[in-house]
């Protein structure tokens, strides 16, 4: 077994990473608290934070009273040190947002995706145009942008350049990273949208404080991010979390992936709307988008027995799917997100919890809370923007590491 010698430089980088991460995630903290929270000596904290202040990454951000001594100086990451961009590449639209390092959105661009089988080149062009537009809109220098994270539907195969596999829209090993890189010099980071949502909620939302959690994204399609002992579980090729393509009804409804009975065919927005059209023998308004149609269906449930029955069945399917997650992963928290998940959950969450409890094993279910995503429809973009932040923190803000 080959051993690797740890150098002073490695230790320095690790200390910088630990302190920066604590300041970024916890906000204003004194040097004394940093020492207590990280286990680093007071001398190490003082030396490293002094470096970070000199580099402009950390600033003194006020005072806090101490017991019997001088007030302690609070430290924080300077929001203006740099900027990050988060991109949500969804099946129905692309959202691009630029943030400062306090994760305050400074500019946003929304662009529709008109095709059910979007052309990868056109998607890449929309992403590149969005990157340029938010930089111009926020009036920040392009060289101060630390990078752009891109959360995308389908499986993201990590490698020298990320490939996207999304059979539901006809994408097979699409070189999306290469296509986007052809139009921008920004550092780029790619991941599946459900996984970026999960990271955002772990850092800032409903997942804070949890070590074992599952974050489910319900939109046109359905996915999940599985966090175990604080880390996202990825599997062999990063395809872990394709919850929407687990079988909920053997031999059931055809799914866009080519199989039958997938959960997505019953609880994804397209599947819910298809079931309603079949039950009511109606056709969708040709100009209406999925979000408008689903909102109309939810509103109609107060006066339409058919709409109410379809929604009740949807709650049952979602509850059964969540029960499977409880039994498989024993999480302490399950968070429902995605634009369709939030729309359905705002009305059906008590029913979903009830159905999950009826299907799950009693002991693990009793240890699990089921709640809505707290970051709303921006969660995927916010999570994507954390990808360049995570890179900065892991490097301790050292270049070329």
Image (spheres, rainbow, N blue to C red):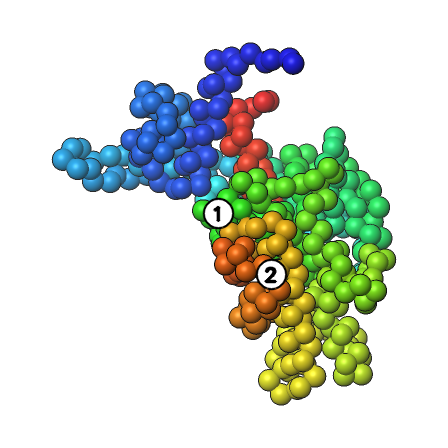
Instruction: Name above or below for residue 374 compared with residue 150.
Output: below
> Could you say whether the residue bearing mark 2 is in a helix, strand or loop?
loop
Q: Nearer the viewer, residue 89 or 11?
A: 11
Tell me residue 218's x, y (percent).
66, 60
- Name the residue at 42% across, 30% down: 19
Tell me residue 185's x, y (percent).
68, 34
Q: Any mark on residue 287, and which?
A: none
- Name the residue at 82% across, 52% down: 167
Can residue 291 be seen here? The reply is no
Instruction: Name above or below for residue 90 compared with residue 230.
Output: below
Which residue is disc 2 drawn over?
360
Which residue is farthest left?
68
Q: Nearer the viewer, residue 361 or 324?
A: 361
52 on left or right of 1: left
- Name the residue at 32% across, 20% down: 43
On-image quarter of the C terminus:
top right
In terms of image quadrants, where is residue 390? Answer: top right
Q: Nearer the viewer, residue 319 or 136?
A: 319
On-image quarter of the N terminus:
top right
Instruction: Name above or below for residue 265 compared with residue 197.
Output: below
Q: Which is more foreground, mark 1 or mark 2?
A: 2
Q: Nearer the viewer, residue 89 or 322?
A: 322
Q: Specify few, some or many for label 1: CA neighbours under 10 Å numbering under 14, 14-19, or 20 or more.
A: some
Question: What separation in Å lies between label 1 and label 2 (alpha carbons)?
Answer: 20 Å
- Name the residue at 16% across, 33% down: 69
Tell me residue 89's x, y (percent).
69, 52
Which residue is disc 1 drawn over?
210
169 on left or right of 326: right
Can residue 28 be seen here? The reply is yes
> Could you say whether the residue bearing mark 1 is in a helix, strand or loop?
loop
Tell me if label 1 and label 2 are in contact, CB under 8 Å: no
């Amino acid at each position: 077994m080959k051993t690797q010698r740890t150098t002073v430089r490695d230790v320095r980088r690790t200390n910088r990473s630990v302190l920066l991460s604590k300041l970024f995630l916890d906000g204003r903290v004194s040097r004394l608290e940093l020492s207590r929270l990280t286990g680093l000596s007071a001398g190490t904290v003082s030396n490293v934070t002094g470096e970070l202040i000199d580099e402009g990454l950390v600033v003194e951000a006020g005072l806090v009273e101490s017991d019997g001594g001088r007030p302690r100086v609070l430290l924080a990451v300077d929001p203006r040190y740099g900027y990050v961009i988060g991109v949500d590449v969804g099946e129905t639209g692309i959202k691009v947002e630029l943030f400062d390092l306090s994760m305050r959105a400074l500019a946003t661009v929304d662009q529709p995706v008109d095709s059910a089988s979007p052309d990868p080149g056109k998607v890449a062009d929309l992403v590149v145009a969005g990157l340029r537009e938010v930089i111009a809109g926020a009036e920040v220098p392009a060289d101060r942008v630390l990078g752009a994270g891109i959360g995308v539907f389908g499986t993201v195969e990590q490698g020298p350049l990320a490939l996207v596999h999304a059979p539901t829209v006809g994408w097979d090993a699409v070189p999306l990273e290469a296509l986007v890189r052809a139009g921008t010099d920004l550092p780029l980071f790619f991941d599946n949208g459900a996984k970026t949502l999960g990271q955002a909620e772990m850092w800032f939302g409903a997942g804070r404080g949890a070590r074992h959690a599952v974050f489910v994204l319900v939109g046109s399609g359905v996915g999940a991010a599985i966090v175990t002992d604080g880390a996202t579980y990825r599997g062999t090729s990063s395809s872990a979390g394709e919850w929407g393509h687990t079988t909920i009804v053997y031999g059931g409804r055809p799914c866009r992936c080519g199989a039958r009975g997938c959960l997505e065919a019953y609880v994804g927005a397209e599947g819910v709307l298809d079931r309603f059209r079949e039950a009511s023998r109606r056709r969708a308004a040709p100009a209406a988008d999925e979000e408008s149609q689903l909102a109309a269906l939810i509103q109609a449930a107060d006066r339409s027995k058919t709409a109410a029955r379809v929604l009740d069945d949807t709650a049952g399917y979602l509850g059964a799917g969540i029960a499977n997650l409880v039994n498989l992963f024993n999480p302490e928290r399950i968070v429902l997100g995605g634009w369709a998940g939030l729309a359905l959950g705002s009305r059906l969450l008590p029913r979903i919890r009830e159905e999950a409890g009826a299907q799950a094993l009693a002991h693990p279910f009793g240890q699990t809370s089921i709640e809505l995503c707290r970051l709303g429809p921006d969660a995927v973009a916010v999570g994507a923007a954390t990808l360049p932040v995570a890179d900065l923190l892991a490097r301790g803000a050292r270049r070329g590491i």
